[in-house]
Amino acid sequence: MAHGLIVVLLALGLAVALDWLRRTLPEHRSSFEAAFVRPGSHDARPATLARIEREVTLATGTAFDVHYRLRPVLRPIAAGLVARHGVDLDRMPERAAKLVGPETWELVRPDRPAPVDRMAAGLPVAEVDRVVAELERLACS
């Protein structure tokens, strides 16, 4: 019985030591594995994509974030898309509104007032989807 207890204790000690080594030693790729990794490739997401995702997420929370975070991202996109059709977003509002669609226009129009209640509800995700769809439609036309 004493031998069995010693074997169990040694096995537990070995498991703890192996776990500690695994966590503390740096991971080393073999030269074979390293040959398949492209230089400069990594799993990180582009910073711009992460920033835009953050702005969209925040915009679903409060009216402040819609106006001061998401709107500044959408305006240049919409301006560039309507410019392809010879329309200036700020100087030709009627034509620009027809091109971008009603929901997008409400966000990007030059005379959009800042929210009175900054903590009011932001945009529902469905509305964000529709705005993106309107911009994609305009980009493809």
Image (cartoon, helix red, strand yellow):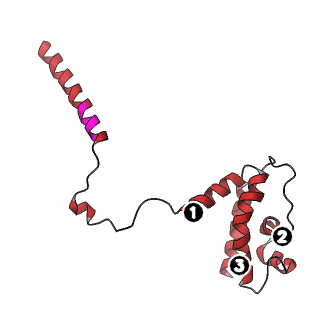
Give whichever of discs 3 and 2 has the lower sequence position: 3
Q: Which mark is residue 110?
A: 2
Gap between marks 2 and 1, in whole Å? 25 Å
Decide: few, some or many residues near mark 2? Use Cα within 10 Å; few <14, some 14-19, many ≥20: few
Give whichever of discs 2 and 1 has the lower sequence position: 1
Secondary element under disc 1, as helix, strand or loop, is helix
| Residue 20 part of the magenta segment | yes
Q: Left of 55 or right of it: where is 7?
A: left
Secondary element under disc 3, as helix, strand or loop, is helix
Farthest-out residue, bottom? 86
Q: Quadrant of the C terminus?
A: bottom right
Secondary element under disc 2, as helix, strand or loop, is loop
Q: Amino acid at mark 1?
A: Leu
Residue plotted at (67% across, 73% down): 136
Residue under pointer 3: 81
| Residue 95 part of the magenta segment | no
Q: Amino acid at mark 2?
A: Pro
Mark 3 near mark 2, Cβ–Cβ under 8 Å?
no
Task: State which mark lies toward you, 3 or 2.
Answer: 2
Q: Is residue 1 visible?
A: no
Which residues make up the magenta segment?
17-23
Q: Position of residue 23 (x, y in %)?
A: 31, 40
Q: Quadrant of residue 38?
A: bottom left
Q: Position of residue 8 (x, y in %)?
A: 19, 22
Q: Amino acid at mark 3?
A: Leu
Q: Is 30 above or below relative to 19?
A: below
Q: Is 64 above or below relative to 78?
A: above
